[in-house]
Image (cartoon, rainbow, N blue to C red):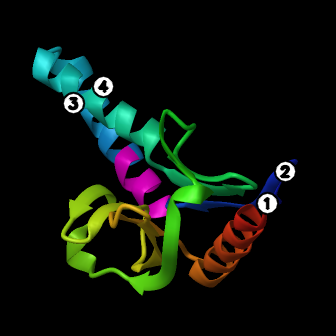
Amino acid sequence: MKAGAGETYRHTQVNWRVITVLAVAWMAAFLVAVQIGHPIAIAVVATLGVLLSQFPTLTIIVHREAIEVFFGPGLIRRRIDLGRIQDLRIVRTPWYYGWGIRLTPFGWLWRLWGLDGVEIQFDDGHCFRVGSDEPDRLASALEHATRTFAAR
């Protein structure tokens, strides 16, 4: 997806594996819930529906003043002002830290799939890692945006 007005970078990752697994699980749970009508079965259907609607994609947008990261349609999002970024680097996160949103030993991790990403170090020492299937392009866009922001 191309960057829009005021954006220097925009990329959406789609995890078809997650979509497929959650959709199949949702359909199976739905059939069970219809058959038995138990509140727990209905809760499972609702939970799987929420997961399916919120976590099939991860979008990263670099604006002139911030980076935005969000899952699905954007209800779960994080915005980081470029002025807070002290440093960044391309990283490979171990598989056992999992996917989704995780608090890890190095800070928060937002990852849809894969192991590569970019670690953003804040001016207060905290870190945030975002998974990306194109970490080089993301790091380059962030470096350019933070230099341009700092030059103002």
Sequence-first disc among 1 and 2: 2
What amino acid type should be assigned to the residue bearing mark 1? Answer: Arg
Quadrant into which the C terminus falls? bottom right
Dot 3: few (<14), some (14–19), or many (≥20) neighbours within 10 Å? Answer: some
Q: Which residue is mark 2?
A: 4
Sequence-first disc among 4 and 2: 2
User: Of tags 1 and 2, which is closer to the observer?
Assistant: 1
Kindly identify the residue that appears in the image at 27 percent across and 82 percent down.
Answer: 94
Q: Secondary structure at mark 1?
A: loop
Q: Residue furthest right?
A: 5
User: Of tags 3 and 1, which is closer to the observer?
Assistant: 1
Marks 4 & 2, CB-CB < 8 Å contact: no
Q: Which residue is mark 3?
A: 44
Q: Which residue is mark 1?
A: 152
Q: Secondary structure at mark 3?
A: helix
Kindly identify the residue that appears in the image at 56 percent across and 76 percent down.
Answer: 133
In this orientation, which residue lies closer to the viewer: 104 or 48?
104
Q: Which residue is mark 4?
A: 46
Q: Position of residue 55 (x, y in %)?
A: 44, 47
